Image (cartoon, rainbow, N blue to C red):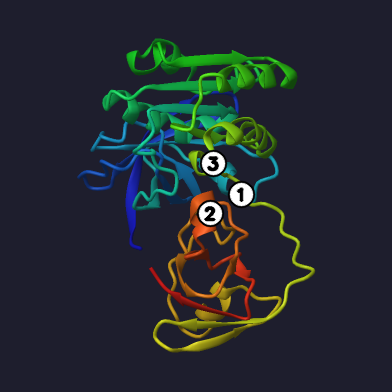
Amino acid sequence: MSSVKVVVSQIVDETPSVRSLRLVRDGGGTLGPYEAGAHIDVKGPTGVLRQYSLCGPPTEPDSLLIAVKREVDSRGGSEALHRVREGDILEISEPRNILGVAQDADTHLLIAAGIGVTPLLSMAYHLHDSGANFELVYFSHSREHTAFLELLETRAEFRDRVHLHIGITRGQQQTVLDELAGSASSTSAVYTCGPEGFMDTVASVFTPLVGPNNVHIEHFVASDIDTSGDTAFTVEMDTGETFEIPSDRSILSVLEENGIEVFKSCEEGICGSCVSGVLEGEPEHRDNCLSAADKAAGNQIALCVSRAKTSRLVIELF
């Protein structure tokens, strides 16, 4: 996928650790519109490539907005973007979407904690513009650390749909979620993003009510994977080429080693870039990008982390 050069046109310190960057196309031109819930790859000054959710109005054509949290233990991506200045040039990918808005839901519940609010903001803009019934529930530690606080409290799109829960305990979070679940049904769609434990709690509360296919989770970090029991298997391409995948290698790495070009980005099972089709065999899903319904269908696989339950997979590249 081709990259696009953009200029950082505006930087806003949203919290002491979160800054938003407004990006415009270098040399002029449009960047949008895009699908609500989308993200982009961003290559910072150090060359580190990371994924960031788009958090502005999806219909806005002239710029893209991302928010970057400075992570102390990061591998350099967030630190680098906290050093850029207005006027600096970055490289980004075209927007792509693995979250998306459910088309058949009659109620949409957007549930965020911390920086997890970013992918849900673009969805809130879209749902407001389309006249959908939605609520945005946002948990944060303090007002100082609530990103986009002024926007959420004052802008018409959000003011009457936003429920801020600032500085409450985990036990109180559970109470809020249980009360919110009282308004959910099998025709509701739930979207959540935030720390892993928080998203697990949201899923445990709402899955029995709305079903696993109606709980949509956006991950920022890769899950730990136990590879101790991994075994070798065979991958056959729809073109007839066959490759042995050793127990200590990914499908992606073997294909690339053999000159097969696969679009990739995070290589951690988060972004969905390398997701490909499964024509035969049963994948062992280890990613955090495919939905529960996609995994159950068994006709897609994230080549960077997932493996095979069967001795052979037949795949096609998307």
Crowding at mark 2 (Cα within 10 Å: few <14, some 14-19, many 20+):
few
Which residue is denoted by mark 2 in the rendering? 46
Position of residue 64 relative to residue 239, above or below, is: above
- Which of pointers 1 and 2 lies earlier in the amino acid sequence? 2
Which residue is denoted by mark 3 in the rendering? 217
Q: Amino acid at mark 2?
A: Thr
Quadrant, the N terminus: bottom left
- Marks 1 & 2, CB-CB < 8 Å contact: yes
- Residue drawn at point x = 38 percent, y = 51 percent: 96
Separation of marks 1 and 3 at Cα, in angstroms: 25 Å
Q: Quadrant of residue 269?
A: bottom right
- Which of pointers 3 and 2 lies earlier in the amino acid sequence? 2
- Residue drawn at point x = 67 percent, y = 20 percent: 173
Mark 1 vs mark 3, foreground winner is 3
For the residue pair 184 and 84, the one nearer the viewer reads as 184
Separation of marks 1 and 2 at Cα, in angstroms: 8 Å
Q: In terms of secondary structure, where does tag 1 sit?
A: loop
- Marks 1 & 3, CB-CB < 8 Å contact: no
Residue 9 point in image, percent of width and height: 34, 35
Which residue is denoted by mark 1 in the rendering? 76
Q: Amino acid at mark 3?
A: Ile
Mark 1 vs mark 2, foreground winner is 1
Residue 119 point in image, percent of width and height: 46, 36
